Image: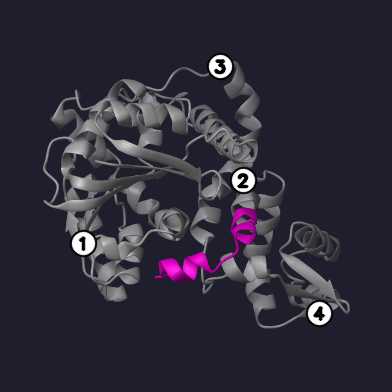
Amino acid sequence: MPTLAAIAQVPDDLLAAAVALCLDAAALPVLLGALDLDLLARLARGPATLDWLAAEQADRTGDAALEMLLELGSGFGLFALRDRRYELTALSRTFFLEDSPLRLLGLVDRHRRYVDAIAALPAALRDTRRADRRVWSPAADAGAQADYFRARAAFNEASRDYFRDTASLLARAHGPRDLRAHRVVCDVGAGPAAFAAILKASAPHLQVHAAEVTYKDPAYLAATAADLRAEGLDVALHPVNVLHEPLPPAIDLLTANRLFSGLDRSGAEGWAARLHAALAPGGTLALVDFFATGDPAHDRSLAALVALWMAWNRHELQRVPLTDPSDDRHAWGWNPPWRCDELSRLLARVGFHDIRARSVVPPFALVEARK
């Protein structure tokens, strides 16, 4: 598990380039093609000529297709050609190998589904309804919420690698933070607790809690606990619905990543009030999410991601039409991304102050505030 110090050592432009590549509908298939042919793992062992690689790949792809893949991969920054031999770039070595220091293969694999789906974007732009996020609201019935989250347990388990490998992007926001000033940290909606694990690895003195409703699923809880044991990290796992069950006491740093992007405006203030109540006086709330900042480059990245989401939703609904009234895809639809200034005003209404926002790694942004 990388520490905050290790994450901070990766140059901003290199990390931004890796995420941008995963959002690029032309570049991503090239990266996937290289991974499917094990080209990155092969070149990690040392440079090789086109002829050498063609001989190795003769039973998997043709010479022309391989040359095209290597040429396009070089253009997208995955490979470099020196003295007629291809080698890996810092971009590939840092993010796209199994043993990369900031492995993003979980992000790449999650975005694989968008390659076929992108063709559905024009249809989505013509005909998409509004999302129904009422089940995420504090006003929703607790039993209905329990049913919903039980149904999502399989999805969350299938997304374990994605959440684990992208935790470093979330943690990037906390590089400047002096964790010595904190004692009790709780991550809400913690998923596989990878982000919480990074905080614990970076600051062993912290008492770190991970709160996640999916921990009510015994298999998911056991798998998460096993991952933490393998890392030798002591993170307390809490199987709670934060809207209806208490969080640990004395929290002075409360984090919630990728939470508000799933909330409807009508229910968000209740969530914010709940988070405010859970913090100790003087404590800090830190939200890292897909927020619009007003910076054109950042917001283009966010727009690219949201377009992929909407295309995939449309693609899936066309591929497997809705027939079951209990299918949670009935809730799918358009929910505009939160803007940092909009969220800042909401946090102020429930009592937060000293509210600040900034881009972290586009399309991720940080909004933080104090109680």
Labels 1 and 3: the sequence-earlier one: 3
Per the rendering, the mark at residue 52 is 4
Seen in the picture, residue 252 relative to 79 is either above or below; the reply is above
| Residue 350 point in image, percent of width and height | 25, 28
Q: Nearer the viewer, residue 55 or 183?
A: 183
Q: Amino acid at mark 4?
A: Trp
Q: Secondary structure at mark 1?
A: loop
> What residue is shown with label 3?
127
Q: Amino acid at mark 3?
A: Asp
Q: Secondary structure at mark 2?
A: helix
- Residue at (47% x, 37% y) in the render: 291
| Residue 357 point in image, percent of width and height | 45, 41
Instruction: Say which of marks 2 and 1 sits in front.
Output: 1
Q: Amino acid at mark 1?
A: Arg
Dot 3: within a 10 Å radius of its alpha carbon, few (fewer than 14), some, or many (20 or more) residues? few
Specify the quadrant that holds the C terminus: top left
Specify the quadrant that holds the N terminus: bottom left
Q: Main secondary structure of the magenta part?
A: helix
- Residue at (31% x, 74% y) in the render: 231
Dot 1: within a 10 Å radius of its alpha carbon, few (fewer than 14), some, or many (20 or more) residues? some
Labels 3 and 2: the sequence-earlier one: 2
Asked whether residue 38 appears in the rendered view, the answer is no
Label 2 and label 1: CA atoms lie apart by 37 Å
Label 1 and label 3: CA atoms lie apart by 49 Å
* Labels 1 & 4 near each other (Cβ < 8 A): no
> What residue is shown with label 1?
183
Dot 4: within a 10 Å radius of its alpha carbon, few (fewer than 14), some, or many (20 or more) residues? few
Q: Amino acid at mark 2?
A: Leu
* Stretch of the chain drawn in magenta: 1-17
Labels 1 and 4: the sequence-earlier one: 4
